[in-house]
Amino acid sequence: MKRLELKVTYKCTDHCRHCIYCSTDRQGTFLTTSDVERIIRQTRPTGCVLFTGGEASLAPEVVVHGMGFAKIEQSGQRF
Ligand code: SF4
């Protein structure tokens, strides 16, 4: 798999009429850091990993953790 797109949440503070995900600020579903690690490990993307939603910035700890984990998995380097 080259590119991986992770929807970390469907929550969003905007209320766009055209939203194909019907995202609202009442959505409460978020991926966890463990979810992100498992998905990246299973799919092994060789290209970019996109963190989207909803509004991905509402889950900063998951995005930051996922970015670091994806970089480690792709480079093969472990600390
Ligand atoms: S996810 Fe995008 S399209 Fe949907 S409400 Fe939020 S900003 Fe608008």
Image (cartoon, rainbow, N blue to C red):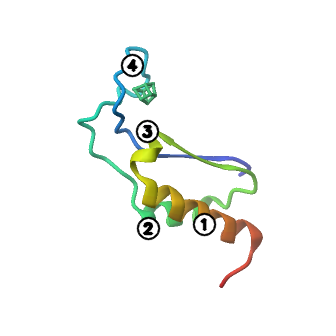
Q: Residue at position x 27%, y 45% from top?
A: 28
Q: Which residue is drawn at 50% across and 56% down?
A: 63
Q: Position of residue 62 (x, y in %)?
A: 45, 59
Mark number displayed over residue 35: none
The residue where tag 3 is placed is 55
Element marked by disc 2: helix
User: Which of marks 1 and 2 precedes in the sequence?
Assistant: 2
Mark nearer the N terminus (3 vs 1): 3
Q: Is residue 15 left or right of residue 4?
A: left
Label 4 sits on residue: 16
> Is label 3's Cβ within 8 Å of ligand 1?
yes
**Residue plotted at (73% across, 78% down):** 77
Residue at the image point whose x is 43% and y is 39% from the top: 55
Figure quadrant, ligand 1: top left
Q: Marks 1 and 3: in contact by CB < 8 Å?
A: no
Residue behind mark 1: 68
Residue extending farthest left: 26
Helix, strand or loop at label 1? It is helix
- Tag 4, which secondary structure? loop
